[in-house]
């Protein structure tokens, strides 16, 4: 990829940011994460308390792409058929016909995904991993592109079902949506419809479809062309390997970590039960290239890898009880690990 393509990709991404900013105040990390996951062709998990514009952000992303959008509200009484569809008996013909569920769309918002029971989660897992769903005895392909954005509330645990590690690993990124700053909250107040909390969708600013299929295809091609030198590839592998405790650490006693700098990170491993798999390495490689694209560069730097490490790895590291007791979260552990991995 030449410099002209890099600059054109960066301009297009800035245009997408500006379009989304017409509705979403602040939340730059969330907006960039949404765009990065869409370009990479992966799925996204959003975590944050209610009222932080997670649903609005996903709807806005669908609007600027012009793709078919469906929202599924997950509840404890949801059934797999409510998600994927079911067979309907046609009395006139004496045969079954397929009624497709809401999962047959390009952009799926799985709202409060951790409220659904295991059967529903497993049905979504097939869709995310295989890009297909099984109804009766047949499997049906999902439309391309297929993009799942799931949300979950971190403060409510009653009536929820924790996502299994296998499903968490299928999410390319996990984004933590934080509270706005005071200045941003003032802008939110100024944009809100006066005394009209109900029906406020009628007053939502319309967005242009600036990221249609052709533009999305260009960004994906540009991301594929971003160069990753061998030293950076080794740094990516070392960063992910550093999350894996050496033999003798943790309840499962995982395989030894061979990452450079792992010896210096011994004190951190008491906080980790299990580290990231090679799927995390692949994800970090993909997102680091897109981070470079955001900056208009045709090559990846160590800073791109560091920036990508948090959303890529925070849901792939299983923390120990000691981490919880000491009040440490995944981001803190990742930060400490990265400090021990030598730069290329």
Image (spheres, grey):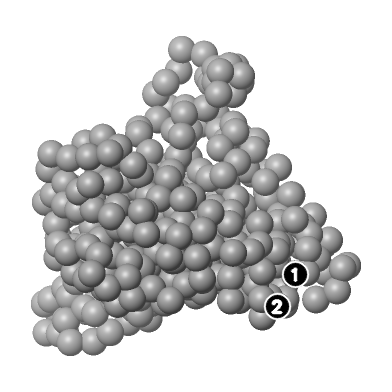
Q: Is residue 153 above or below residue 224?
A: above
Q: Quadrant of the N terminus?
A: bottom right
Locate residue 241: give its quadrant.
bottom left
Q: Residues within 10 Å of mark 2 (few under 14, many from 20)?
A: few
**Towards the viewer: 213 or 30:** 30
> Is the Cβ of the residue at disc 2 closer than 8 Å to that at disc 1?
yes
The image position of residue 221, as x and y in percent, is 69, 76
Q: Residues within 10 Å of mark 1 (few under 14, many from 20)?
A: many
Residue with the mark numbered 1? 299
**Towards the viewer: 121 or 137:** 121
Residue with the mark numbered 2? 229
**Towards the viewer: 251 or 31:** 251
Q: How many marks?
A: 2
Q: Is residue 319 above or below residue 138?
A: above
The image position of residue 341, as x and y in percent, is 54, 63
**Towards the viewer: 325 or 140:** 325
Q: Quadrant of the C terminus?
A: bottom right
Whichever of labels 2 and 1 marks the residue nearer the N terminus, that label is 2
* Residue 162 in sight in this render: yes
Residue drawn at (74%, 49%) of the image: 15
The local secondary structure at tag 2 comes to loop
* Residue furthest to the top: 195
Horizontal arrangement in the rendering, residue 294 relative to residue 338 (left or right): right
Nearest to viewer (mark 2 / mark 1): 2
């Amino acid at each position: 990829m030449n410099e002209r393509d890099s600059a054109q990709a960066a301009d297009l991404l800035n245009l997408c940011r500006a379009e989304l900013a017409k509705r979403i105040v602040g939340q730059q990390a969330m907006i960039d994460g949404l765009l990065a996951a869409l370009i990479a062709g992966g799925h996204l998990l959003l975590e944050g308390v209610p009222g932080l514009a997670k649903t609005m952000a996903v709807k806005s992303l669908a609007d600027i792409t012009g793709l078919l959008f469906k929202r599924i509200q997950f509840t404890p009484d949801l059934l797999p058929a409510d998600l994927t569809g079911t067979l309907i008996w046609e009395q006139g013909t004496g045969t079954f016909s397929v009624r497709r569920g809401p999962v047959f769309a390009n952009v799926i918002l799985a709202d409060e995904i951790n409220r659904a029971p295991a059967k529903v989660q497993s049905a979504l897992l097939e869709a995310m991993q295989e890009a297909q769903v099984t109804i009766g005895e047949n499997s049906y392909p999902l439309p391309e592109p297929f993009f799942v954005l799931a949300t979950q509330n971190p403060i409510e645990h009653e009536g929820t079902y924790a996502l299994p590690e296998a499903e968490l690993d299928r999410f390319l990124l996990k984004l933590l949506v934080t509270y706005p700053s005071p200045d941003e909250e003032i802008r939110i107040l100024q944009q809100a419809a006066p005394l009209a909390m109900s029906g406020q969708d009628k007053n939502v600013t319309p967005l242009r479809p600036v990221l249609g299929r052709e533009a999305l295809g260009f960004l994906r091609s540009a991301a594929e062309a971003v160069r990753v030198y061998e030293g950076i590839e080794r740094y990516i592998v070392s960063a992910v390997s550093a999350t894996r405790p050496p033999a003798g650490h943790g309840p499962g006693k995982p395989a030894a970590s061979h990452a450079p700098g792992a010896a210096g990170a011994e004190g951190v491993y008491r906080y980790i039960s299990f580290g990231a798999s090679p799927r995390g390495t692949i994800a970090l490689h993909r997102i680091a290239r897109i981070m470079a694209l955001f900056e208009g560069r045709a090559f990846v730097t160590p800073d791109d890898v560091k920036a990508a490490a948090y959303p890529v790895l925070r849901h792939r590291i299983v923390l120990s009880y000691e981490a919880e007791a000491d009040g440490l979260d995944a981001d803190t552990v990742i930060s400490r690990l990265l400090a021990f991995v030598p730069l290329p």
